């Protein structure tokens, strides 16, 4: 992958419009009920909402929870040909605990079906066809899935990593090799500081940390989300900042996944980084204004946000 020369109109060379998202799908067990989740699934659903061609590779158990997840994916319009079924391990469940301030902590049960994602011929072929492969860090907690993901990244696709440092699955020995495979790295400001600690970097301003970490990882785009304060990108020696769009927030669930989908969708269309960042912030803001990680919407809803003053 190359970024064409230019400080403000950098474009990415992507070989096809096919996107492959790889990783976990699960049920979040919330006090108010079960919600389908998993960052790769959320990103795939948002990409589809934005009109992109996307496949999701994951693994569920041969159980009722797995059947329900597969039905959810099919009802959402996603292809399920790369959803593998495991006869021994169960479908993933995450127990979500909310304190009195609605802050969440998570019990991520293991082992589960997505810990054993296999490299099938069909999956290998989709990876070779893909122009973009989106993967995260959580699904690589187990050797089997980590080896599958790593092997699928050995091609000319643009690799996009969504960093998700959930203790205890946040070990440098596992995460850092995955970072080095990526062309585009997306993380939040807290995760940026964690990566800086790994490199023994002195605490300094965010831009300085981004430049040093991007140089160490050798990625071409490093994107740091700042919640309600928008996001910042470092690429090709330049910074691109967006303050975010102000909306009445319902919840933050899935907003980061929507942001990433918005960014990828625009880079596929060879939009400038500034325009891609603008669209990504609008997509994340819209989802934050709705309930749940994957609300129903189309691109017109995002356009309405874009027409607001940021």
Image (cartoon, rainbow, N blue to C red):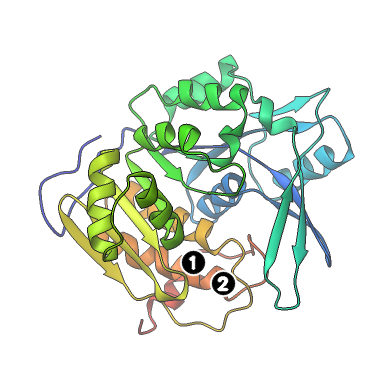
Q: Look at the numbered disc 2 and give the secondary structure of its residue.
A: helix
34 with respect to 105 (left or right): right
Seen from the viewer's position, the closer of residues 185 and 132 is: 185
Q: Residues within 10 Å of mark 1 (few under 14, many from 20)?
A: many
> In the image, residue 108 lies at what x, y percent?
72, 46
38 with respect to 287 (left or right): right
Q: Are marks 1 and 2 in contact (CB under 8 Å)?
A: yes
Viewport quadrant of the N terminus: top left
293 with respect to 178 (left or right): right
What residue is pinned by disc 1?
284
The image's mark for residue 288 is 2
> In the image, residue 177 lies at what x, y percent?
41, 31
Residue beneath the point at 71% across and 55% down = 106
> In the image, residue 253 lies at what x, y percent?
62, 64
Residue beneath the point at 55% across and 27% down = 146
Res 157 quadrant in image: top left
């Amino acid at each position: 992958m190359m970024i064409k020369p230019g400080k403000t109109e950098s474009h990415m060379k992507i070989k096809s419009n096919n996107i492959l998202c790889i990783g976990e799908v699960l049920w979040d067990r919330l006090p108010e009920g079960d919600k389908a989740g998993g960052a790769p699934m959320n990103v795939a659903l948002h990409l589809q909402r934005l009109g992109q061609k996307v496949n999701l590779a994951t693994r569920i158990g041969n159980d009722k929870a797995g059947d329900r997840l597969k039905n959810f994916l099919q009802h959402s319009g996603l292809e399920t040909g790369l959803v593998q079924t495991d006869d021994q391990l169960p479908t993933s469940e995450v127990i979500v605990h909310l304190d009195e301030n609605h802050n969440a902590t998570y019990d991520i049960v293991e082992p589960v079906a997505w810990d054993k994602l296999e490299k099938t011929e069909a999956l290998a072929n989709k990876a070779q066809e893909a122009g973009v492969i989106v993967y995260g860090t959580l699904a690589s907690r187990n050797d089997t899935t980590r080896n599958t993901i790593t092997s699928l990244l050995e091609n000319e696709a643009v690799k996009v990593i969504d960093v998700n440092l959930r203790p205890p699955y946040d070990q440098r020995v596992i995460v850092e090799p995955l970072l080095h495979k990526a062309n585009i790295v997306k993380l939040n400001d807290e995760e940026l500081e964690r990566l800086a600690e790994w490199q023994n970097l002195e605490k300094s301003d965010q831009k300085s940390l981004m430049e040093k970490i991007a140089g160490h990882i050798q990625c071409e785009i490093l994107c740091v989300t700042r919640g309600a304060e928008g996001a910042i990108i470092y690429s090709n020696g330049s910074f691109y900042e967006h303050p975010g769009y102000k909306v009445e927030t319902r919840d933050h669930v899935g907003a980061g996944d929507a942001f990433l989908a918005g960014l990828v969708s625009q880079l596929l269309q060879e939009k400038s980084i500034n325009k891609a960042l603008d669209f990504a912030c609008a997509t994340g803001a819209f989802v934050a204004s709705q309930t749940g990680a994957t609300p129903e919407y189309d691109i017109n809803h995002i356009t309405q946000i874009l027409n607001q003053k940021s």
